[in-house]
Image (cartoon, rainbow, N blue to C red):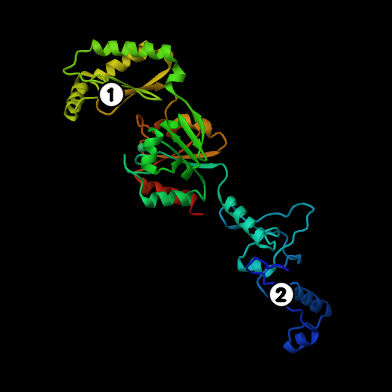
């Protein structure tokens, strides 16, 4: 006879069947023969009716609905299945707040473990995703995440599915969120989702080269280099175009300039609108390419296909009914703006990683 793994069910071996004389000596027997026989049967089954533990054989006549664990671990009542015979804990357990379902009370260690796994899975809200920007949201800008933040994400993952979306490539995101980022998050979208991982497996990649094709790329690059060659500005350096997997970065002065030269160009550009005029010309010339031009930083602007902002990753998240997005640059022109405003997301603006944790605890972990 095996042990009962349920901590409220003692082993049968330690409960010898009581004799009638023993019960009478103890003064615990009922004058009602039928009640006495019921108590005797319970004792033999290891189901002392005075103990706070359920008897799987007992059918509670007074309680019409069983108590069940909800996703958040609180108790609620639900109607018994039609035509089924609900086997319930003792009524005293309802009053004590202990909650069981008939199927959860299955003797045996393996059964108990299965119940635990099922309970943990049930705690996680189905169809809800918490999706995070990286810089300024999970980490300080361009810094690594703190151990406290990494631990927080682990805890949050027990409540909801968790994803991260960043504009940087996977190498850079790994430096900030750890080498195990693709396993630490249910979804990991680097380069705004052009590289997509789910449960640590690569589920999609996209690149500017394969999307536009070499002919269109060459046409764009040739025109842009000619435009820069004809541009009359105080100084020029090297690396006017930087070709990345998901975008082209264009710099009229060249990315090889010094910090001092950057500062000078920024001032010059504010007066002469060098980048603004250039973007206007390129937008007109390549309207049929459906490109987005994003002026950022001091000396350059980014060019990428329309929709290749953070909303790109949403194509992998069709199964979710609620996508909560958390980002710090959710204002117009910020790199979180499009996904924050998307009809597919519930947007949350955060001011720091601490604020992110605070908002998440309130939203997902307080119930
Ligand atoms: Mg950010």
Query: Which circle's residue, 1 or 2, is located before the other in the chain?
Result: 2
Q: Nearer the viewer, mark 1 or mark 2?
A: 2
Task: Say the numbered circle drawn on residue 300.
Answer: 1
Q: Secondary structure at mark 1?
A: strand
Instruction: Judge from the rendering whether residue 29 lies leftward or rightward of residue 277; answer left or right.
Output: right
Q: Which residue is more in the foreground, 124 or 270?
A: 124
Q: Position of residue 237 (x, y in %)?
A: 21, 20
Determine if residue 103 is in view: yes
Q: Secondary structure at mark 2?
A: helix
Using the rendered view, name the quadrant where residue 277 is placed.
Answer: top left
Instruction: Judge from the rendering whether residue 140 lies leftward or rightward of residue 64; answer left or right.
Output: left
Q: Position of residue 279 (x, y in %)?
A: 31, 17
Determine if residue 76 is in view: no
The residue where tag 2 is placed is: 13
Residue drawn at (46%, 19%), measured in percent from left and top? 211
Using the rendered view, name the quadrant where residue 269 is placed.
Answer: top left
Are discs 1 and 2 less than 8 Å apart at CB?
no
Instruction: Judge from the rendering whether residue 231 lies leftward or rightward of residue 8; answer left or right.
Output: left
The CB of the residue at mark 2 lies under 8 Å from ligand 1? no
* Ligand 1 visible in quadrant: top left
Most extreme residue toward the right, as rendered?
A: 33
């Amino acid at each position: 006879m095996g042990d009962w793994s349920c901590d409220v069910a003692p082993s049968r071996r330690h409960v010898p069947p009581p004799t009638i004389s023993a019960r009478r000596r103890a003064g615990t027997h009922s004058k009602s023969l039928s009640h006495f026989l019921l108590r005797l049967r319970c004792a033999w089954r290891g189901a002392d009716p005075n103990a706070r533990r359920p008897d799987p054989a007992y059918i509670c006549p007074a309680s019409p609905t069983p108590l069940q664990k909800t996703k958040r671990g609180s108790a609620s009542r639900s109607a018994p299945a039609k035509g089924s015979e609900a086997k319930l804990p003792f009524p005293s357990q309802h009053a004590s707040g202990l909650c069981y379902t008939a199927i959860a009370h299955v003797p045996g260690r393996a059964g108990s473990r299965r119940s635990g796994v099922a309970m943990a899975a049930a705690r996680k809200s189905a169809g809800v995703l918490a999706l995070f920007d990286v810089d300024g949201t999970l980490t300080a800008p361009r810094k690594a995440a703190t151990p406290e933040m990494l631990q927080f994400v682990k805890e949050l993952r027990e409540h909801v599915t968790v994803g991260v979306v960043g504009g940087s490539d996977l190498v850079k995101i790994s430096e900030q969120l750890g080498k195990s980022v693709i396993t630490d998050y249910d979804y990991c979208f680097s380069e705004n989702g052009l590289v997509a991982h789910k449960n640590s497996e690569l589920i999609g990649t996209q690149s500017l080269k394969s999307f536009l094709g070499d002919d269109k790329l060459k046409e764009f690059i040739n025109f842009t280099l000619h435009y820069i060659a004809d541009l009359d500005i105080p100084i020029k350096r090297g690396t006017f175009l930087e070709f990345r997997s998901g975008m082209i970065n264009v710099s009229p002065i060249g990315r090889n300039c010094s910090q001092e030269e950057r500062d000078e160009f920024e001032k010059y550009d504010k007066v002469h609108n060098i980048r603004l005029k250039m973007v206007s010309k390129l937008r007109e010339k390549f309207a049929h390419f459906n490109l987005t031009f994003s002026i950022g930083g001091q000396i350059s602007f980014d060019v990428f296909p329309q929709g290749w902002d953070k909303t790109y990753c949403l194509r992998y998240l069709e199964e979710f009914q609620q996508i909560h997005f958390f980002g710090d640059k959710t204002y117009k022109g910020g790199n979180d703006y499009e996904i924050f405003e998307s009809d597919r997301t519930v947007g949350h603006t955060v001011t720091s990683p601490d604020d992110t944790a605070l908002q998440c605890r309130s939203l997902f972990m307080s119930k």
